[in-house]
Image (cartoon, rainbow, N blue to C red):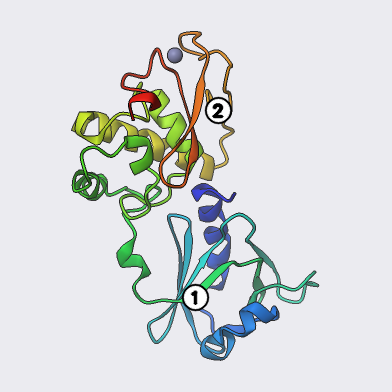
Amino acid sequence: MPEGDAIHRAARRLQVLVGQELEVEAPHPRAAVKQLAPKLDGRRLESVEAIGKNILFRFEGGLVLRSHLRMSGRWRVLDRDAPVFGTPWLVLKGEDHAGVLWNGPVLELDRGVARRLGPDILAEPPDYDGMVERIRREDSRRQIGDALLDQRLVSGIGNIWKVESLWTQRISPWRRLGDVSEEELRAVLSTAHDVMRARVEGVPFRAAIYRRKGHMCPRCGTPVEAWPQGDDARMTYWCPTCQKGEGPATA
Ligand SMILES: [Zn+2]
């Protein structure tokens, strides 16, 4: 699944199209029915921005195209006249380059999306105050591992970064928000920002406990545990010894 850092890399490559009037085509039938191409063709692209796992394209006239890649979507930037394989959902052609989207499960024109998303964990600098404020408005019984993946509270933290940041800060993903201090909350958010930023810059990353159920915790040697968490049943990983807080049994 494209995580937040991959989305940011794609948005960065797409910057070559900003400022240009684009030729817009929607070759894929499921994209064609949305009538996006006639609405966007010939408009100037004002900005491309990654917010959480969304890429937002702002066009002149206030039109905002939102692309969410889910599991399968992929943006590529090609030379304008390079051959395009398969049937892309959207082709945005500028003077020298073309942005091409394959398998774009979520593609829509939307003016309100930016308002509904929490502050972006990858922003420079991140709006930690805004994130903390949104998280504090949540039910204090909600578990922190679940809340960190809620895009309304903070956008862009993928499951792997949630798992690793909580481990780094020694906090159990099962701990209730009411039992997490402000200092701890800020430490987890800033760890997530730092590791994800490093990934955007291409720094290699090796997970300590993510997808390492049964392996020894690199810090204390206890076998790593794994259990689904939250309404989406995302698999979470934790060390029951050095990450303080309750486990799923009491959740
Ligand atoms: Zn441990």
- Picture residue at 49% right of the left edge, 30% below the top: 227
The answer to whether the residue labelled 1 contacts the one labelled 2, judged by CB atoms less than 8 Å apart, is no
- Rendered position, 10 above or below 198: below
Asked if residue 224 lies left or right of residue 62, the reply is right
Mark 2 sits near ligand 1, with its Cβ under 8 Å away: no
> Tag 1, which secondary structure?
strand
For image coordinates 46% across by 37% down, the residue present is 161
| Three-letter residue code for mark 2 | Ala
Give the residue at mark 1: 108
Q: At x 47% / y 61%, what residue is drawn?
A: 54
Left or right: residue 148 compared with residue 36: left
Q: Secondary structure at mark 2?
A: loop
Nearer to us of marks 1 and 2 is: 1
Crowd tier of the residue under label 2, counting other residues whose Cα lies within 10 Å: few below 14, some 14–19, many 20 or above: few
Find residue 207 and name its label.
Answer: 2
Front residue of 128/135: it is 135
Identified by mark 1, the residue type is Glu
Instruction: Report, in whole angstroms, how far the alpha carbon at label 1 lies from the one at label 2.
Output: 34 Å
